[in-house]
């Protein structure tokens, strides 16, 4: 079974919706390295349809000297969707939600994808959360964790503080 890591940009009040509208003032070289290392440690991406469509519209035309765009565009991508039939982004496979546990034993990285993250968490399939907590209160927007989730203890595995005030927190599910 794959190892699933959820990575999210989160405001101090738990909002993860549209980070492109509020996270850029806090972007630093430290954050760039953290995100790059995270991407290199992953073997494939697991995305919900909405996040996939946003990424597929942006990433294929991006370039950078560090190779982040090449990695994003070149790595395998699994999109959980019942409506997407013809993905345009290279190396993309559309799967049903019940096929996730049958994916190869590799490290899957989930970004955004709120409905998918909720479903994965409810099924106990998220192995790790990697959160970039930003020092901003948005006062509204979609929160990462929705009401009705099961109580689940997580263990803090790593923490870093960036010069912008962003906290990079890595949590793993505690053994039962």
Image: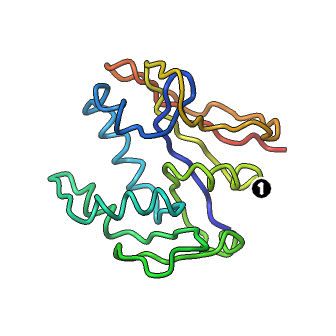
Q: For the image shown, how many numbered marks are present on the structure?
A: 1
Classify the position of the N terminus by image quarter.
bottom right
Query: In the current view of this chain or complex, which residue is farthest to the left?
Result: 65
Classify the position of the C terminus by image quarter.
top right
x, y (%) of residue 145? 66, 37
Please tell me whether mark 1 sits on a helix, a strand or a loop. loop
- At 62% from the left and 51% from the top, the residue drawn is 117
- At 31% from the left and 62% from the top, the residue drawn is 57
- Is 71 rendered above or below residue 129? below
- Is 106 rendered above or below residue 127? below
Question: Depth check: 162 or 91 in front?
Answer: 91
x, y (%) of residue 44? 47, 65
Question: Depth check: 126 or 106 in front?
Answer: 126
x, y (%) of residue 100? 65, 69
- Is 4 rendered above or below residue 9? below
- At 46% from the left and 24% from the top, the residue drawn is 167
Residue 76: quarter of image:
bottom left
Question: Depth check: 156 or 49 in front?
Answer: 49
- At 42% from the left and 77% from the top, the residue drawn is 87
Image coloring type: rainbow
x, y (%) of residue 139? 52, 21
Callout 1 environment at 10 Å: few (<14), some (14 to 19), or many (20+)?
few
Label 1, on which residue? 123
Query: In the current view of this chain or complex, which residue is farthest to the right?
Result: 176
């Amino acid at each position: 079974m794959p190892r699933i890591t959820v990575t999210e940009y989160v405001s101090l009040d738990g909002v993860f919706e549209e980070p492109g509208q509020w996270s850029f003032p806090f972007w630093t070289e430290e954050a760039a390295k953290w995100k790059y290392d995270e991407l290199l440690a992953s073997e494939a991406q697991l995305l919900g349809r909405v996040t996939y469509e946003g990424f597929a519209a942006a990433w294929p035309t991006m370039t950078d000297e560090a190779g982040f765009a090449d990695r994003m565009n070149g790595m395998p991508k699994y999109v959980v969707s019942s409506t997407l039939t013809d993905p345009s982004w290279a190396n993309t496979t559309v799967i049903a939600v019940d096929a996730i546990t049958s994916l190869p034993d590799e490290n899957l990285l989930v970004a955004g994808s709120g409905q998918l993250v909720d479903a994965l968490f409810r099924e106990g399939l998220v192995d790790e959360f990697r959160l970039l907590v930003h020092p901003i209160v948005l006062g509204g927007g979609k929160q990462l964790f929705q009401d009705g989730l099961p109580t689940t203890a997580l263990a803090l595995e790593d923490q870093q503080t960036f010069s912008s005030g962003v906290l990079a927190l890595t949590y793993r599910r505690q053994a039962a």
